[in-house]
Amino acid sequence: MEEDKDKIQFELTNALLEHIEQLIAAQEDKVLQNTLEAYHYADIAEILDELNLEQAIYVIKLLDSERTSDILKELDEDNREKVLKNLTAQEIADEVEELDTDDAADIISELPEERQQAVIDRIEDQEHKAEIEELLAYDEDTAGGLMAKELVKVYETWTVAGCLRRIRGQAKEVSRVHSVYVVDKEEKLIGRLSLKDLVVAKSEQKIADIYISNVDCVNVHANAEEVAKIMAKYDLEAIPVVDDTKTLLGRITIDDIVDVLKEEAEKDYQMAAGITGDVEADDTILELTRARLPWLFLGLVGGIGAFLIMEGFEGLFTGKAVILFFFTPLIAAMAGNVGVQSSAIIVQGLANDDVKGSVNSRLLKEMVLAALNGVILALFLFLFVWAFKGEPNTALAISVSLVAVIIVAGLIGTFVPLFLNKRGIDPAIATGPFITTSNDILGILLYFWIAKMILGI
């Protein structure tokens, strides 16, 4: 426990980084090995991410493959790509031989196709090699792309005594034993085995007499997000993966699902910010421009649309009604904010599978909520305009417009993500500039139209 506590408290300081760099420069290999020995492989990966490429490769080649294989999978993706480019196919093969099949497949999949085969050809363990090739055949966003082949399985015909002996042998190849799966003679998943039941059972009992038939599983072609939802719903640390005939193929563990959730959250955050594609701060200017420009262009088109609407109501900007012009940014901002709030709640609900009931009931609820918020805000705005300008009709026009804009923005913010989700489009797009721009334009149109009706201009 004390060792784990020390690892949790790891902090990469400038002093430690400078010390590591000095040891590398002086080629004090033994001292460097002893220094790094005290740290968890994830901590070492954090250190390597801060070193330059030459220094990182020096450390990778200095440490043994059993240690560096874990370090490689924890490296920043861009840094890992650079390191792998500077390792030979044999060196990479030595690394992946030490990893579980899912991690090994992930690293190999990042290589160019010609290097992938060169690395696979140099893997000595033929069973490990075949399993990695099997995993590489699946789409990375499916259960097959996430699963590992390492697991503990037993046959229903085994006795408890024989089962225990075989479990000990299988467990050596599995880093963590979350579950023991039971299969029939055709390798079909039929249940799971409680370790407690196994320990207390009599040696001569058959596994068929003590296994639990109720076991959650996912199809090998199931979407990664679907797998994440199932594991989260049933609070599972691992879940078995089967094919269409229920044949047991592998298992997915919680650490893989955490990675899926993290990647999905990052993607949704970027989409909400108006960034298309998976980009990072260190990407090239051209890549960042391609990711940002589409939504910026949409904002430009939206701005032109707002200009054309305002030009159509040019007659309002005379006399006492000129005050309407100064409240245009407020109306546009409120429309955008309400739309984003509504869509964000729906998108979050869809992601967590919490959105239940009909679309109509959702829209009705949002309309009532938006109307309540709108009336409260409009009342405050009415009093402000009346007190500031002493014109109750103008204050009424602006306030009524605000209520209408908020209601419509709330409805659009609710309907659009639900509609996109029904069409198989990521609803996270509805929390970004798309919903903001559309609500801005519609809000301005409603604002001037209602104001013109009330003021009779």
Image (cartoon, rainbow, N blue to C red):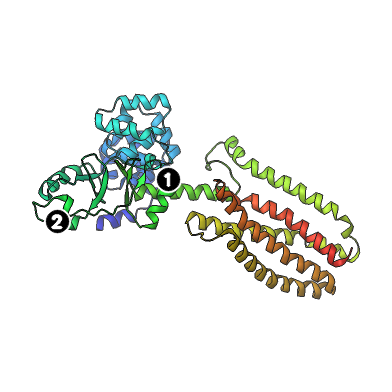
Q: Is residue 26 visible?
A: no
Q: Nearer the viewer, residue 294 or 14?
A: 294
Kindly identify which numbered label has been placed on residue 37: none
Q: Quadrant of the N terminus?
A: bottom left
Q: Nearer the viewer, residue 136 or 281?
A: 136
Q: Is residue 279 above or below residue 214?
A: above
Q: Residue 87, image x and y in percent?
A: 36, 29
Q: Is residue 110 left or right of residue 159?
A: right
Q: Nearer the viewer, residue 344 or 72?
A: 344
**Identity, as a three-letter code, of the amino acid under mark 2:** Val
Dot 2 falls on a residue whose secondary structure is helix
Q: Residue 206, image x and y in percent?
A: 13, 50
**Residue at image location 59% in from the left, 37% down from the top:** 285
Q: Is residue 319 visible?
A: yes
Q: Is residue 323 above or below residue 110?
A: below
Q: CA distance from mark 1 to mark 2?
A: 35 Å
**Residue at image location 85% in from the left, 52% down from the top:** 312
Name the residue at the right extreme: 319
Instruction: Name the residue that disc number 1 marks.
Output: 224
**Identity, as a three-letter code, of the amino acid under mark 1:** Ala
Instruction: Name the residue that disc number 2 marks.
Output: 199
